[in-house]
Amino acid sequence: MATASTSAPLSAAPEAAPGHGAVKASEIAVGVIIGRTSEFFDFFVYAIASVVVFPALVFPHLSPVDGMMASFGLFALAFVARPFGTALFIAIDRRFGRAFRLTSALLLLGTSTVAVAFLPGHSQVGAWSAILLAAFRISQGVALGGAWDGLSSLLALSAPQGRRGWYAMVPQLGAPIGLIVASALFAYFLTVLPAEDFLDWGWRYPFFCAFAINVVALFARLRIVVTPTFQALFRARELRPTPVVRAIREEGPRIILGAFAPLASFAMFHMVTVFPLSWVFLFTSERPSRFLIIELVAAVAGVLAIMASGLLADRYGRRAVLAATAAGIAAFSGFAPQLLGAGQLGETVFMLLGFVLLGLAFGQASGSVASSFSIRNRYTSSALTGDLAWLFGAGFAPLAALYLSVKGGLLASGAYLLSGALATLLALWLNSALGADRLKRKAKSEPKG
């Protein structure tokens, strides 16, 4: 069966949908930003609560450090569950369609998120508090695996020649935007409420907001995804779900390389968001609300850096930007974590510098080797690649960084970040070598003359 060229213009597909005009890339971008912002807002609401709420609410019988580590252990469960959610919802997609899949996934995500808002504490139900939180977190991970709507891949494939770096960064804007809103909400409640009231009921309101945002995002995304024109675009680009087992069998090595290529940015992601908040909360007398404001301001710098990554990638190449930022992150890991122990000025410098590096790297981290997937497996392979990248690079990052810092000081936490940077450089080199080898084999197989 002939496949559509990945460079086909946006107007190519509407022929299959009479009465509908050509789709603009900006329309796809709006849907992508709405979807990713809602997902990252959920993510950061839970992440911030993992630091300022759950250790005291769910693990009050443990020391502050052990309670934080236990909280981070539950935090990682969503990343472990996410690939299983992808497999489940791809099967649902193949049987019932993309609209049903997205609706059921976001319904599960919203239900799991709002359920956390009703979580009873350890003082009320004992160990069941942790068990319930673990169950809700696993449900969130399964739902996040199903929330993949393919719009990011569609945007990348529909990007004009010479502008692919710019369009690749669009989905990544959802992360700092989600962090800005989540940080602002928690900072507000931490500031206006006494500690007892915040721990009793104030922390629950951001989770209700997350549920409301999910509902709005669901309708906004469905309005885009289920239209005949967009369905035609998905078909034209062969962005249809294939069985997970087949994708792994045919694309396994490329999926692994794709997961490790952005590892530096994914590890950096938590080193400048969740981990520093936990360190400040545990080992300084600073109010967490003040540090959340620093995160908010630094996230704005991250937005600008993500946008800059698109311009740089279009000029120098996406892989060149990833390699350069991985080297920068490796250097950052050798000295910057110590800034967290250098007072408020050091914290501010750490956050601003970290978010600039994160933005430059994370802006091009999505699907950095996705073009190497075969067209028929690209949809499923891209989803699995993202799941594994988050699992390996981010899922255990707060726990690992905190453990290393407690055992060996702040400098030791840079070891996790350094490992991610080295993994990225190695994966990019291997992918380049495999690509060159494929070109050589193709050249040899072609008839001469």
Image (tube, helix red, strand yellow):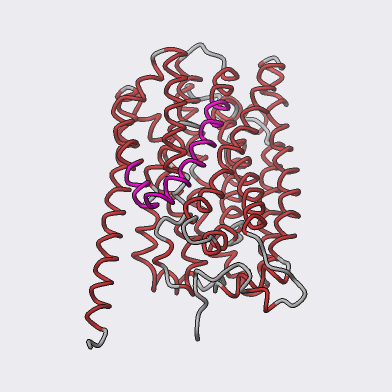
User: Is residue 304 on the magenta stretch?
Assistant: yes
Q: Please report the residue visible at 44 percent of the width from the left and 71 percent of the height from the top.
A: 247
Front residue of 102/160: it is 160
Left-right relation of 35 to 379: right
Left-right relation of 273 to 401: right
Q: Position of residue 307 (x, y in %)?
A: 52, 42
Q: Which residues are magenta?
A: 295-324
Q: Position of residue 65 (x, y in %)?
A: 45, 24
Q: Please report the residue visible at 30 percent of the width from the left and 36 percent of the height from the top.
A: 330
Q: Position of residue 200 (x, y in %)?
A: 70, 24
- Tell me which corner region of the image, top left, top right, bottom left or bottom right, holds residue 106: bottom right
404 in relation to 115, above or below: above
Front residue of 357/275: it is 357
Q: Main secondary structure of the magenta part?
A: helix
Front residue of 374/445: it is 445
Q: Quarter of the image for the C terminus: give it.
A: bottom left
| Name of the residue lying farthest toward the front | 449
- Tell me which corner region of the image, top left, top right, bottom left or bottom right, holds residue 259: bottom left
